[in-house]
Image: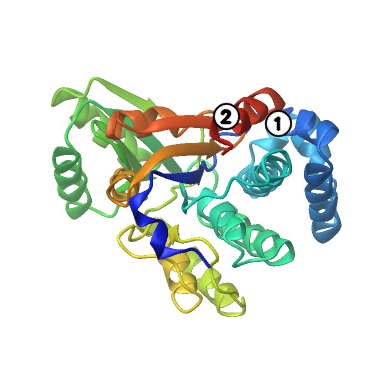
Amino acid sequence: MYSKSESSMVKAAFVFPGQGSQYVGMGMDVYGSYGAAREVFDRAGEILGQDIKDLCFRGPAEELNLTVNTQLAVLVTEIALYEAFRQEAPHVRPHYLAGHSLGEYAAIYAAGSLAMTDVVTIVRARARYHHEAVPVGCGAMAAVIGLEQSVIEGVCREYTASGDLVADLANLNAPGQTVISGHAQAVSEVLGRLKSLGAKMCVQLPISVPCHSRLMTRAADAFRRDLEGVKFLPFQIPVLPNFDPHVFHSPEKAAELLWRQMTSPVRWRETVERLASLGVGTVVEIGPKRVLGGLIKNIDRRLRVLFVGDVPSLRETAALISP
């Protein structure tokens, strides 16, 4: 287990991004350079009964970007990058872990609470439930830049109260950056209202699944039954959950926290603020693309942010952070 006696030293956290960080070719160079990464991709392929590395390395993009495939591909790539980093820098151990949405599962794996078979199996179920949650084209997500969260929340609440369509806060990412999620028509109309209130930018995200909204309630309830059959082992490294970053995951609470994550906002700003309050000075983002680093810097510029996404960045970060 982690040692509480380390509280006086500058600490490191590893964080994992979620869906949207994928690209065709991700993980290919670490697969060719590190036995630990090869083992992850090959083992995941055996568990899934499909060549997940071929999907990651060669695509096509249309297949990779389907939610039912994306979640598994990103998860396996992040685990492979994490294991490759451990091979390169065996003496580096994070004090805390966190992940953004899907990335929370990679964090739980890195904490030793879920073995490869369990984490891949449960994320496959999660991806399927997300994919089946609403008909294609009926859901949407969009990022809103330059407005206070309270303003966005007020507009979403007012809009939802006036009819049957849903628009919810989905990702509370950083000061001035919030993602909304819900029915495609609702998201579009709410964006129009937010632009009139002074939003600097509104960006429709390339995803039709209304993640972290009330539209995922039925999917979350089905997923809860899967989670109840999973045995979570003791966490060797503390993991901050998206649903409530002011607590830590535990074998007793993990299933409920992951179930609630499906329909609740990702509280990323609070997550980073909590890491800083715990004495974290260095954050290492482990994932296919740099997604979280910019958000982290917008939240707290004092934090040093490093990246592990391919062989060059892995080796550079290992050299910078090794004792």
Q: Which residue is mark 1?
A: 26
Q: Residues within 10 Å of mark 1 (few under 14, many from 20)?
A: many
Q: Nearer the viewer, residue 182 or 124?
A: 124
Q: Quadrant of the C terminus?
A: top right
Would you identify the image quadrant in which residue 268 lies?
top left
Residue 3 numbered tag: none
| Residue 247 x/y as whole percent | 34, 65
Would you identify the image quadrant in which residue 317 lies?
top right
State if disc 1 and disc 2 touch (CB < 8 Å): yes
Q: Nearer the viewer, residue 218 or 212?
A: 212
Q: Is residue 124 above or below residue 23?
A: below
- Does the image show residue 106? yes
Q: Residue at x 57, y 60 (%)?
A: 111
**Which label's residue is closer to the chain start, 2 or 1?**
1
Q: Which residue is mark 2?
A: 289
Helix, strand or loop for disc 2: loop
Q: Nearer the viewer, residue 318 or 55?
A: 318
- For the residues labelled 2 and 1, the Cα–Cα distance comes to 9 Å
| Residue 115 x/y as whole percent | 69, 65
Q: Residue at x 23, y 20 (%)?
A: 200
Q: Residue at x 20, y 30 (%)?
A: 194
Residue type of the residue flagged with mark 2: Lys
Residue furthest to the top: 200
- Does the image show residue 59? no
Residue type of the residue flagged with mark 1: Met
Would you identify the image quadrant in which residue 309 lies?
top right
